[in-house]
Image (cartoon, grey):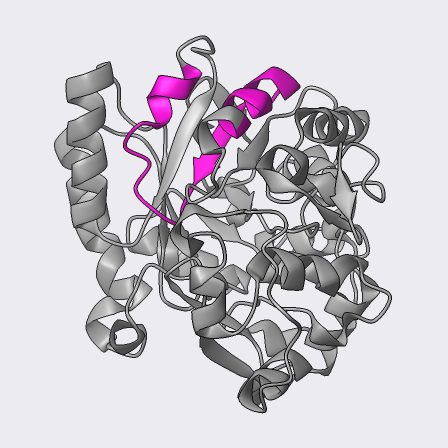
Amino acid sequence: MMNQWKPLQIGKYTIPLPIVQGGMGVGLSWDQLAGTVSKYGALGTISAVGTGYYQNGKYAGKMVKGRPVQPENLNPPQALQEIFTNARKLCGDAPLACNILYALNNYGQIVQDACEAGANMIVTGAGLPLDLPEFTKAYPDVALIPIVSSARALKIICKRWLKRYNRLPDAVVLEGPLSGGHLGFSKEQITDPAFRLEALLPEVVTARNEFGDFPVIAAGGIWTKEDIERMVALGADGVQIATRFIGTFECDASLAQKQALIDAQAEDITIIDSPVGHPGRALKSELFRRIETNAAPQIACVSNCVGPCERGTGARKVGFCIADRLSDTQFAEDPTLGLYFTGAYGYRLEKLQTVKSVLAELTGTDATALV
């Protein structure tokens, strides 16, 4: 039974249920989802990506045609502070994490903004955050959680952090190739059995053991209680689940995003190229049909969101601006040209549920026991 499993101990923080809600930007995991997840004993994660869109751009200093201008307006500290404040109204002092894409142009500043806003943990993927501890020196209680796709990546991070900062990660998330959004694998590796989460997890656990005893959190394609038990049997201390939480009433995602997944079939999910430089998993939406016919929206690079894109160079290669298309999924009057990220099993969403009922199913407990 789940209630016999150990809670997650991440730094100084105890998470009663060994489940981390994955960070999802732009606008999918903000105050309502993260605050509710933490309220019921799992770890809620606020995405720091694109917070300039929060509350209709209230905190973005400058916008052009509904787009925040430049990174400081795409990710303003005032918006992140307000998101954390509102999440705390739901979960009180329960731990909250903040997911920050390493590829963001103002990454270091956002890490500091998150710490100031009250994040208990920083979760970072889409690149190796070799300098993450540099930005949290003034916040020794903030736990640091890199996302990796291999044992080699974890070893590189541990060695660099020990040498430069005399510290180790407080936990590590291993994301397998069934995850949603950006993937740390080549297109060939995504379908190679050697790179399945089940194959990678024991290797990462062994690598962790070389450096310490911080938790290993498995992610990617985890949907049921049985999936969680399987990961724990392979050595995981907990799991990260993202896409399944999109199918909750409390998720900050738009109704269009939720309905798109509820309506989706397995064949509607595909691997795409992203301006970030990594393959990604998303729904085959109208956006990609327009790209194929050279009728996609014009790329203007208003927000200048991620370094690898090089001010729209990467966007023009793949045919879309990731900041604009992710935001349109959530905030545009017509969301049909949005980018709908999803995990491999997003098509398994059939209806909306409460966060409480999802956690009850995942833990095999009665929902009334979750307080």
Residue 211 horizontal side relative to residue 20, left or right: left
Q: Is residue 331 visible?
A: yes
The segment highlighted magenta reads: 110-136
Outermost residue on the top side: it is 138
300 up-or-down from 265: above or below: above
Decide which of 328, 348 is in the foreground and name it.
328
Q: Residue at x 42, y 10 (%)?
A: 140
Q: Is residue 370 visible?
A: no
Residue 314 lies, in percent from the top left, at: 43, 63
> Does 170 sit above or below residue 250?
above
Which residue is located at x 73 percent, y 82 percent?
263
Give the quarter of the image for residue 309: bottom left
Q: Quadrant of residue 34?
A: top right
The structure residue drawn at horizontal position 71% and vertical position 27%, both measured from the top left corner, is: 84
Q: Position of residue 214 (x, y in %)?
A: 31, 30
Residue 86 image offset from top left, x and y in percent: 80, 29
